[in-house]
Image: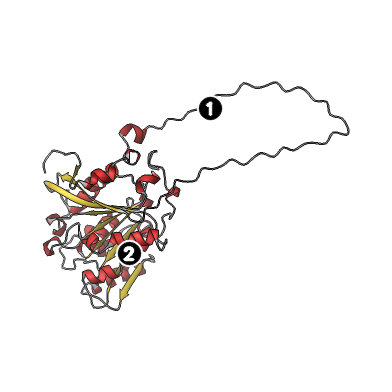
Amino acid sequence: MLNRSRVLAVLIPVLMAFCAGCEPLVPTPTAWYVIVTLSPVPATPTPTPAVTPTATDTPTITPIPPTDTPSPPRCDETHGTMVTFQFYSEIQEREVPFRVYAPPCYRQTERRYPYVILLHGLSRLGYTDAQWDNLGVDTALDRGITIYQDLPPMLLVMPDGGEIADLNRFDEESYEYVILNELIPQVERVLCTWNAREARAIGGISRGGFWAFEIAFRHPDMFSAVGGHSPHFDTQDNVPPENDPLELALTMPIEQLRGLRIYFDHAADDPVRPSCERLSRSLTQRGVEHEYRINPTGGHTDAYWEMHMREYLEFYGREWPRDPYQLPSCLEPSP
């Protein structure tokens, strides 16, 4: 592992446009962590002459005019923004790109948004950080936020896994460590995120689904929800029990397991079905609520995942506010 670090860099020039004029959403350290509260100056009391009431005095009630609450600034944006960032991974010894979808009005609202880390399928099959983008996740979320108004605004983070994501490696140079110790700190540094467990979710497609469950089951204090879309669990004894989601479903503390919202799905004829059924049986045996969907048509294909994209987004955002002004302020530390 190299002992060096690099400043977060920009892959594409559109980042300049994305960040232009939005300093409050990427605050400087001073603006982010220091809150200045001005105390009102006490007014000098004005003496009130004494009034001697008489038996015929009638009290006079002066109504207090209501205080006008300023309306949030109107934003007419109908599309979010997809931007690619990169950071240097000391674990992988390479520049790692990750795509970010920011919802409409992200800059204007100056709020801290919940976010989902979305992992792609096997790199050796050609999948990269572009997979979710190619499946139309941005279009689906745009429509859910602005047209149907049944999805909450959220940030989507789509990292490129590279070769390390294909390996059954579980030491301090594993993909789990890349996500937890390199990606998340970078995301929460460059974006205005709500950095709390209840505002952070993780999910993945195929091999990415394996990693999503492995990471969430081992670190339930970090995530409130985990999803797997045709998750490919390795059943060939190549994963140690302490990293195997199928084993962790039976061994991890029940309170932690029940504290996660869990969702996984696949097509009826998908080869991942036996391992997913095993996971569902284990969760049911322990009395853990979960959503397990076997869809009648489709395969282990991009067409299947694209068909169910709205369902995935609905699951991740189910407990998050649809009104961005109910989110924490970006100008204050994350709660």
Q: Quadrant of the N terminus?
A: top left
Q: Amino acid at mark 2?
A: Tyr
Q: Residues within 10 Å of mark 2 (few under 14, many from 20)?
A: many
The image quarter containing residue 309 is bottom left
Q: Quadrant of the C terminus?
A: top left
Check the image and tell me how it is coloured. Answer: secondary structure
Find the distance from the CA under tag 1 to the CA under tag 2: 48 Å
Q: Amino acid at mark 1?
A: Pro
Tally the numbered discs: 2
Q: Secondary structure at mark 1?
A: loop
Q: Residues within 10 Å of mark 1 (few under 14, many from 20)?
A: few
The image quarter containing residue 316 is bottom left
Residue 290 seen in render: yes
> Which residue bears the numbered disc 2?
312
Q: Disc 1 vs disc 2: Cβ atoms closer than 8 Å? A: no
Q: Secondary structure at mark 2?
A: helix
- In-front residue for pair 82/166: 82
Residue 111 seen in render: no
Q: Residue at x 28, y 73 (%)?
A: 277
Residue lying furthest right = 55
- In-front residue for pair 52/33: 52
> Which residue bears the numbered disc 1?
40
